[in-house]
Amino acid sequence: MSQTIKQLVADSYQNAKDKGWHDPGMEKSVGDDIALMHSELSEALEDFREGRGVREVYYQYKSGGIVVSVSALEAEEMKERGDTTSLKPCGIPIELADVLIRIFDFAGKHGVDLEAAVEKKMAYNATRPHRHGGKKL
């Protein structure tokens, strides 16, 4: 995938719209949207706290009301066997993707030129001194 940020914003917003997240009665405040962005980071933190690797992707599915987790290898083997179980990708990389998707949707919803904002901020950051601000973290 080699889309621009503008394309990712448009696609994320359109998908959310198509799935009903922007229907009348589904309006969210700016604070609601930011909280949902934050919730995806919290999910990434929980995966880390549970011992998942920062690059680890695993899958989950429901079986008789029970959530079952399988490794990427096990998920691939299930697909090769023709198993039609719906496998939900999970893990820190997936949660980070969810953060970006929520940010892209927000930008699309509010007409934010996120691509220009990223370019401006990166250009500014390039001018900052080494470990600016004198903070430890």
Image (tube, rainbow, N blue to C red):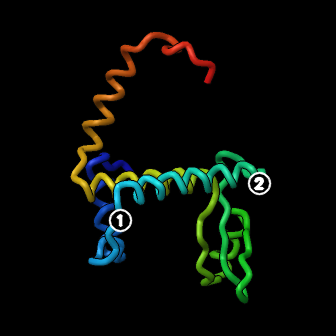
Q: Farthest residue toward the top?
A: 129
The reply, left or right, for residue 70 in relation to residue 113 is: right
Callout 2: SS: loop
Question: Viewer-proximal residue, 97 or 42?
Answer: 42
In the picture, the quarter occupied by the C terminus is top right
Residue at mark 1 to residue at mark 2: CA–CA distance? 31 Å
Q: Farthest residue toward the right?
A: 51
Callout 1: SS: loop
Q: Residues within 10 Å of mark 1 (few under 14, many from 20)?
A: few
Question: Viewer-proximal residue, 89 or 18?
Answer: 18
**What residue lies at 65% left-to-right and 83% top-to-bottom?**
83
**What residue lies at 36% left-to-right and 14% top-to-bottom?**
127
How far across and down, in percent of the image, does residue 92 sit?
Answer: 62, 51
Q: Nearer the viewer, mark 1 or mark 2?
A: 1
Q: Which of the 4 image quadrants contains residue 73?
A: bottom right
The reply, left or right, for residue 47 in relation to residue 31 is: right
Q: Farthest residue toward the bottom?
A: 64
How far across and down, in percent of the image, does residue 16 sit?
Answer: 35, 68
Residue linked to disc 1: 28
**What residue lies at 28% left-to-right and 29% top-to-bottom?**
120
**What residue lies at 65% left-to-right and 49% top-to-bottom?**
45
Amino acid tagged 1:
Lys
Mark 1 or mark 2, earlier in chain: 1
How many tags in the picture?
A: 2
Amino acid tagged 2:
Glu
The reply, left or right, for residue 47 in relation to residue 127 is: right
Residue linked to disc 2: 50
Numbered circle sitting on residue 20: none
Q: Which of the 4 image quadrants contains residue 69?
A: bottom right
The reply, left or right, for residue 77 in relation to residue 36 is: right
